[in-house]
Amino acid sequence: MTSPSPFPHRNLLGIAGLQPHEIMFLLDEADQWVAHNRAHRTSDHRLDGLTQINAFFENSTRTLLSFEIAGKRLGADVVNMQAATSSVKKGETLIDTALTLNAMRADVIVIRHGSSGAVRLIADKVDCPVLNAGDGTHEHPTQALLDALTIRRRIGHIAGIRVAICGDLLHSRVARSNIFALTALGAEVRVVAPSTLMPAAIDRMGVTAFTDMDTGIDGCDVVMMLRLQTERMEGGFIPSLREYHMLYGLTPERLKRANAEAFVMHPGPMNRGVEIDSSVADDPKRSAIPEQVEMGVAVRMACLDVLTRERRA
Amino acid sequence: MTSPSPFPHRNLLGIAGLQPHEIMFLLDEADQWVAHNRAHRTSDHRLDGLTQINAFFENSTRTLLSFEIAGKRLGADVVNMQAATSSVKKGETLIDTALTLNAMRADVIVIRHGSSGAVRLIADKVDCPVLNAGDGTHEHPTQALLDALTIRRRIGHIAGIRVAICGDLLHSRVARSNIFALTALGAEVRVVAPSTLMPAAIDRMGVTAFTDMDTGIDGCDVVMMLRLQTERMEGGFIPSLREYHMLYGLTPERLKRANAEAFVMHPGPMNRGVEIDSSVADDPKRSAIPEQVEMGVAVRMACLDVLTRERRA
Amino acid sequence: MTSPSPFPHRNLLGIAGLQPHEIMFLLDEADQWVAHNRAHRTSDHRLDGLTQINAFFENSTRTLLSFEIAGKRLGADVVNMQAATSSVKKGETLIDTALTLNAMRADVIVIRHGSSGAVRLIADKVDCPVLNAGDGTHEHPTQALLDALTIRRRIGHIAGIRVAICGDLLHSRVARSNIFALTALGAEVRVVAPSTLMPAAIDRMGVTAFTDMDTGIDGCDVVMMLRLQTERMEGGFIPSLREYHMLYGLTPERLKRANAEAFVMHPGPMNRGVEIDSSVADDPKRSAIPEQVEMGVAVRMACLDVLTRERRA
């Protein structure tokens, strides 16, 4: 009799729906890859002979680079398909693109897409595991996993801690995935945003909403800042970058409202001087931002490894 | 005494000029790679240490991806040179680009170019095998090979079958290469197009021309649709997409004119609702379109392997 | 007791500051890679398990391709980050990009950037070796090394030879790096340019300046032409391409002023008919241009190997 798989899902489309022990399992796996990567040159080509296609319909240097490095470190044949040069521009439907990638016998497909739900649409059409690298305003599960791993490694646990997620909650898949992950793992999650950038039904996600930042981050262990899409200003969501910084920018003074050992996170790329001050971002004791990037590669190695295990059995 | 090589050509620039047994040899080789790819993880790194340069002067996601996966599955060091970011934009001549790729000691160069004959021009200047991935309105030999392989696997043979190639014959290198391959292998080939999109000298290619589609596909075993470049409409080649669809679009009704077991092919990307209806494209029994993509990788593996054999000896 | 390293630098940011024996050491190493590359398929995966990131903030097909092939031939996991699709466009600072690449645990970073000094800025922020692939009008050290290697292999030595560098000296990092390398290795260096394209303090670099090309190349062993950025014409630096060609273009007649065995170099891509005539560029006896490209891959393999040695120890 074989024991049940610790991660019995074919795809990783989001954090919603995952069991806490499944999230923890991925974090445990990722922890091993952190050690592996730090030791350099411990070649591990367990994905040798597998084809990983990174299909990015939305530009993203960091996430693409992270998935590409993760796959190559595992020995996969990694190929990138970027929308800017793709037949998507010739008017091909998403389904046709999915069928094409599938027919090329991909072993795992990593997808980023500007539309919520597009990744699931593709996943339903292909025979191999699909990893969501961010879809619209829906989910960005590997970002939430790398954030959780960063927190767990800094504090030692996630249950019981208090996290404030601050900024453009309305458009942020990063925030959504983090809320799912952190609440599942037992953290108290607060969200801080101007009312124009706060989702209407945010209360139902098990978080407490604040429009005043000083109150919102009061007594928090982690302050997670979101990137402000500066094009939101034209949309009328915020009056001006300067006012946004004044009310919602993370300054050293404001950070004093959080716990004495609180640290700061940001998914990047940062708008320095808008949502975060450089003196905070560059403080090695208070900023976990470079760790987040490092954890990103490890988490993606874990996900690629776990999702292709059955296929390699 | 050594037996003569079954494929005594340095390059694959086109189907024209190949002997039927040479085409069949490539299809046989590709057949083995289909099995290999379906079995997953049967690593075969016979191109290890060889450098494959994909020089694409024309955007093409599918074909580039297919050649990239093919090369990586064989263990080659694959590098892409895409014109969009190339010194071609700085006004470098094609010859200088060829000499540069050659001086980097490429072992095989895959080229796509918007001008007919450009691939041969490069092939004449370099010391390694060159594979034509589509040049102008001239040839697209690997497309014809993958189409022939798809047909041979579905029907069991090519000699004696009746194939209708329908659409923009005038600008189609896919059609040209297919006509060369299918007639060489003994198929009866018909071409169907409005007179504005029918090449003047098509009769000399050994095919029968039809301007009426119902008549053209009557009794055919294979209906091969071509992509309509929608920009042809501005050129005055067709009155409107709607009228084109009415007269030359492949609908389920129209397909009834073909044989009862006839199947449909399309090189992709498709314009659904223009040259082909979704109900035809998505019918797993009638549509061989995903198989074509799968055969594409296998055919390209075969070509890369065969053309570099001498070099690896 | 261990002997001192023959190349005791963490980075290769420029030629300025290198000792002659250090330059010679890199050339000796590169010589071995030339032989290796010519022998094909002598797999050498000494960089297996290392991650090489090519971060190109300025488009460059040839240099990127050369570094990519060099890294892959050594077995590195090579990933490209091109600015056109990068978060740099989202306004991320250079420092943040550097920290991101570093956090991904790159083992060597190759950088091209449009601003002089940007590469050093990044090198100061990361934990791994950095290779300058061209920064602003500052340096392009691997170009100077490949040029020196080309000369040394043609003539047998560099000390005592006379080299004329001709063209847009004012904006040329290639010229600067070559002047540093060639004078360090004992060559007599002349520079030839119209006064509008001649740097003011050029004399202090140990070269002799000429505005008349016939006089400048008189009795030279090597004539090194620079690419004319044709956009200089709009800047008013030159009156017209035609006049530039008349006064500074390398024609077969003009080349007669150089030594009988003199040969011609050009970093590419060439403007044929502007700074160089095709009859000169394509003369296999007089033109060393394809050799330069070949030496480029070898020099980059040497640099990648040498700079990562400590890390692999």
Image (cartoon, coloured by chain):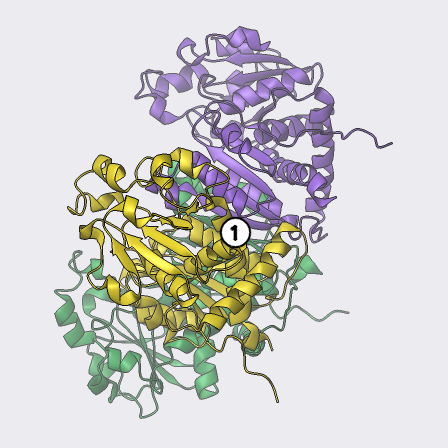
Chain colours: A yellow, B green, C purple
Residue at image position (65%, 29%) is C150
Residue at image position (66%, 55%) is B49
Horizontal arrangement in the rendering, residue C225 relative to residue B243 (left or right): right
- The residue furthest bottom is B260
Image spot of residue B189 (x, y percent): 35, 78
- Does the rendering let one see residue B254? yes
Horizontal arrangement in the rendering, residue C162 relative to residue A5 (left or right): right
- Does the rendering let one see residue B12? no
Image spot of residue C296 (x, y percent): 60, 36
Type of amino acid under label 1 = Arg
Q: Which residue is mark 1?
A: A154
Task: Quadrant for the N terminus of chain C, please.
Answer: top right
Task: State the image quarter where residue B293 is shown.
Answer: bottom left
Name the one closer to the observer, B295 or C254. Answer: B295
Name the one closer to the observer, A201 or B173. Answer: A201
Name the one closer to the observer, C297 or B225. Answer: C297
Q: How many marks?
A: 1
